Amino acid sequence: MDGFDTVGQMLEDSDLIIRAVLAILVIQSVYIWYAVIKFILTTRRVATQCADMQTAVDSMDIAGIRAMLHRFSHLLTRSNGSPSGSAVGTVSADAQVESAAVNASHTLFDEVWGEVYDDLTKSCPGLATIAATAPFIGLFGTVWGILVAFSSVQAAESITFSALAPAIGEALFATMAGLFVAIPAVIANNTLATRAQRLSRRFTQAFTGLVAEVARLGRTPVDRDW
């Protein structure tokens, strides 16, 4: 194998296994950027919805409240154990309203938080997998490159550094590529999970506040007029 002056020349002269390793690492790197861009777009959408909820509550915009409640209507239906207008014994109307607000606050918080958090962190399992596997994929390329280097030495009549350098360079390049992919994956995964947790809590607090406000007004959030 002749020496190489550029990465392109190295890839052109490299072994098929090394090319396959680098191709996998390139695909993983593209996925990292895809996950980051998708997360940014999702956070913008969730942050906009959170701001819209707060605005709807402040201005008591019925159309805005309906739109926000509609997104989680399946959770609202599940969390309301009793139908609207069903009084129990001597429980007063004020007590029912207060109980509805408390139940909405405690029951919906975990469910809505989980749904928003799952929506924000859909790409995190993929990022975690890349962070865990990319170094080993690069290491596999390194081991293969070293094996190729020693095989070429065994077949040669004399051992020279110029004969070993290309194969060893490929091996080290595979290691560097694996780390180049794994490190951003770890950073992206941790950053996305942390920011998703904060935004999910903020969104859930705004949503449960909206539901509590509707209940305080004596309405059931799943009613058609709301």
Image: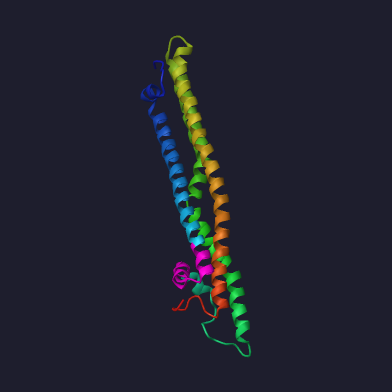
Specify the quadrant of the image occupied by residue 6: top left
Q: Which residues are magenta?
A: 52-72
- The image position of residue 57, as x and y in percent, is 53, 69
Q: Residue at x 46, y 42 (%)?
A: 32
Seen from this angle, which residue lies furthest top?
Answer: 158
Q: Residue at x 47, y 17 (%)?
A: 165
Magenta segment, principal secondary structure?
helix
Specify the quadrant of the image occupied by residue 31: top left
- Judge whether residue 158 is colored magenta: no
Q: Camera-side residue: 125 or 52?
A: 52
9 displayed left or right of 58: left
Seen from this angle, which residue lies furthest front?
Answer: 59
Q: Camera-side residue: 97 or 14?
A: 97
Seen from this angle, which residue lies furthest bottom?
Answer: 90
Q: Residue at x 53, y 76 (%)?
A: 80
63 displayed left or right of 135: left
Q: Residue at x 42, y 29 (%)?
A: 18
- The image position of residue 190, as x and y in percent, is 56, 46
Structure colour scheme: rainbow
